[in-house]
Amino acid sequence: MDHSTAPLVAAVADYRGLARYGFTPPAHRQGRGIDSRVLAALGRDAFSSDILASPGLDDRLARGGLLSEAEALMADAVGADYAFFSTCGSSLSVKAAMLAVAGGDDGGLLVARDSHKSIVAGLVFSGVRPHWITPRWDAERHFSHPPSPAQVEQAWREHPDAAGALIVSPSPYGTCADIRGIAEVCHARGKPLIVDEAWGAHLPFHDDLPTWAMDVGADVCVVSVHKMGMGFEQGSVFHLQGDLVDPKRLSRCADLLMTTSPNVLIYAALDGWRRQMVEFGHDLLDRALTLSRKTRATLDEITGLEVMHDELLGVEASHDLDLLQVLIDVSGTGASGYQAADWLRTHRRLDMGLSDHRRVLATLSTADDELSADALVDGLALWRAGLQDPRPPEIALPKPEDLQLDTVMLPRDAFFAATEAVPAQRAVGRIAAEQLTPYPPGIPAIVPGERIDAAVVDYLRTGVASGMNVPDASDPRLDTIRVVADHH
């Protein structure tokens, strides 16, 4: 295929060049009707390419085939059989994959328990029964690793009628599963593997990056181009290969969730990024990886900071690591990751990709250079130099076994059941009716339908008091927790 073309990008340029005018949405008419104060803040270009997909960018019957051509080019670029664009993020894409594989199937779905909250939302939406695959835990560092092939094999032995399996790799920390081994375990039973690869859009384009799921047998994988590629927020692609998942069924499931007014800006950015990566991706990623290695080494020299690498890999840990995810343990300073992230934002105007009770994470991309990397190093060095009596937060960290809550109701049934808000300590022993998710990274500590235990309640409440963000809680302070009403 001719990867020098970008049909959606070309169509936007053509639309603007011809000065087309649409008596259609969007009503702002490419910025003509926008308040001048909004234009001053956002810029006219933010609106001038905001065009109706059809009739607009394409004709009323989409006879130009622009989207289908762009999706075919994307699939070819990464070695998939099919690619589907999403303007609703990987949150939509992974739900569509779950519905296509397990929707209407009583056997349920094997799901890694370290899954993103969007996967739990998919369980609520679909009514699919989860059979949780326990992640591997580093109890010393309070850190989870993706499940191993052996753990997935054990889950299949316990739930042989499940429709398929779903794992997350890379994790938000950049740690990766042995996807080849897990795919082989699933395929030995003729069952498909879904990989939530939201953090891995860049993986197909450089051999020094972790394994790309399509290269080692995954059936469906979902990527967020806005996370590690040059796409707008909400730009996502889900890829399909093989014959274990029907592409038409997957497309129909996506259509259930997809907006009927897709944002052409997001589509065109996906298309343009694919062309950029095919033509220049290897060299761009080469430079980014070189920059990352240098940055990691420099940060590791700052007293009290530990750039995590070896401890994330090997036996009972992760299979591989994306070096562009620079995970820094700051616990040696006596401070928390929350404190470091807040200082960097306030005093250096730097936002970290993730922070927790002992770590901060900086995500590097092909857009970074020596200037931005130096700003990160200098910022952390200044924070460390000025740190006095940090008074680390007292977070009650649970043991790994305390995080393995019993599922006693389907997530959907618990979410839609009659519920009540009870004081947090009285929620112990009750069935959760809401998910409670430290964010980032967005992995729920409590899922609807699980029986709440005291250790997780203490963890979340002391975490919130120390700076943890739990954005999906009905009560942001976690003084109360929503549970299934007593008569259930």
Image (spheres, rainbow, N blue to C red):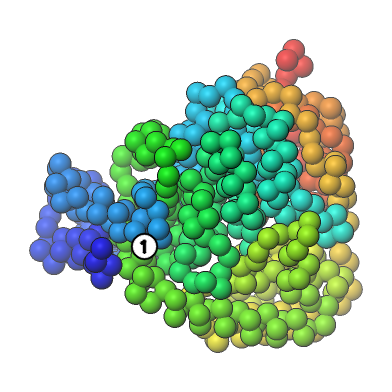
Q: Measured from the top left, where is residue 221 in percent x and y?
A: 49, 50
Residue extending farthest top:
487
Image quarter (top left, top right, bottom left or bottom right) of the C terminus:
top right
Q: Measured from the top left, where is residue 416 in percent x and y?
A: 60, 23
Image quarter (top left, top right, bottom left or bottom right) of the N terminus:
bottom left
Q: Residues within 10 Å of mark 1 (few under 14, many from 20)?
A: some
The amino acid beneath tag 1 is Ala
**Is residue 6 left or right of 320 when viewed as pictured?**
left
Camera sees residue 291 = yes
Q: Is residue 196 above or below residue 3?
A: above
The quadrant where residue 134 appears: top right
Residue at 85% from the left image edge and 41% from the top image edge: 402
Residue at 57% from the left image edge and 22% from the top image edge: 106
Residue at 62% from the left image edge and 43% from the top image edge: 185
The quadrant where residue 8 appears: bottom left
Asked which secondary structure carries label 1, the reply is helix
The quadrant where residue 266 appears: bottom left
Residue at 73% from the left image edge and 19% from the top image edge: 485
Q: Is residue 185 above or below residue 226?
A: above
Of 270 and 345, the residue lying toward us: 270
Q: Measured from the top left, where is residue 69 in percent x and y?
A: 24, 54
Camera sees residue 338 = no
| Numbered disc total | 1
Of 308 and 221, the residue lying toward us: 221
Q: Measured from the top left, where is residue 211 in percent x and y?
A: 56, 62
Residue hosting label 1: 77
